[in-house]
Image (cartoon, grey):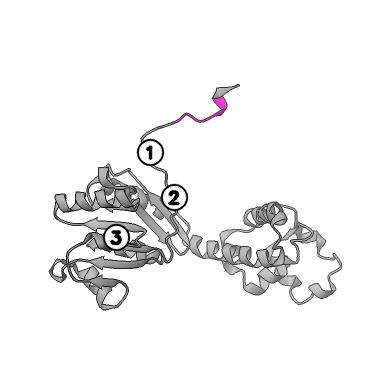
Amino acid sequence: MDEEQFPEVQGGGSLILAWQIRNKRVLVVAAGRILNVLNADAKVTVVSPRDGLNKEVAYRIEKGQVDYVDRKFEPSDLDDVDMVLTAVDDPEASTQIWKLCKERKIAANIADVPPECDFYFGSVHRDGPLQIMVSTNGKGPRLANIVRRSIAEKLPENIGEAITKVGKLRQMLRKVAPKPEEGPKRMSWMIKVSDAYSLEDLCEMSEEDMETLLRFYAPDKVPRLGCLKAMEGELDAFDGSFGFCVGWG
């Protein structure tokens, strides 16, 4: 076997995942990255004496964005919890929470203590559905911010909106072709669409445009956007006369 065709293993990294925590229960002890988990639609509970709250956490509590328990952490707080974030200025208390999480097999992040973290947050750029995370595996958070900003500056301004449109088209396509065995064809056709249309085309595309475009899924064709708009309202009598402007991707 030719081993040169395979990439070399580079240990010491992390498995970077998009962790779906919608409606999962997240316990935050004292402060923490509350906004990160709220953006992921998690159900957040904050446990901390009121005099230990920072301004943002106090704001989230006042607005009812999180549940709040006004006292110090107790082991029973871990009941029915899926994730724990702590930022306690007490190393012994933090380690105790970490050990309890390990006993209960609950993923935890103990702020500023990399050995007591099941995961790291990294530095994230967000544009609608697009999320890009830069991680230094806990070694250089400030440098992660610098790298993230550099990447963000090079991204097209409309990339988030274009991704939103592609997501909407995929949802509509699944209604047109819902059968599991059509999965490969759906994927292949969506690749053609993504290759054929620019970001500007995708941003310009309306839901009516998408409905027209989906008429071409069955013959596995992708018309250019200008031709697509010209066809709207005329497809019921479509006889192939627009074939000159249909690309095969």
Q: Position of residue 170 (x, y in %)?
A: 62, 63
Can I make out residue 28 in this image? Answer: no
Callout 2 environment at 10 Å: few (<14), some (14 to 19), or many (20+)? few
User: Label 2's element?
Assistant: loop
Amino acid type, label 1:
Gly
Picture residue at 75% right of the left edge, 53% below the top: 248
User: Label 1's element?
Assistant: loop
Stretch of the chain drawn in magenta: 4-9
Q: Which mark is in front, 3 or 2?
A: 3
Label for residue 13? 1
Residue 6 lies in the magenta-colored region: yes
Quadrant in which residue 73 is drawn? bottom left
Picture residue at 59% right of the left edge, 69% below the top: 204
Label for residue 17? 2
Left or right: residue 153 compared with residue 221: left
Quadrant in which residue 87 is drawn? bottom left
Question: Of residues 9 and 167, which is closer to you in this image?
Answer: 9
Amino acid type, label 2:
Leu
The residue pinned by badge 3 equals 78
Callout 3 environment at 10 Å: few (<14), some (14 to 19), or many (20+)? some
Callout 1 environment at 10 Å: few (<14), some (14 to 19), or many (20+)? few
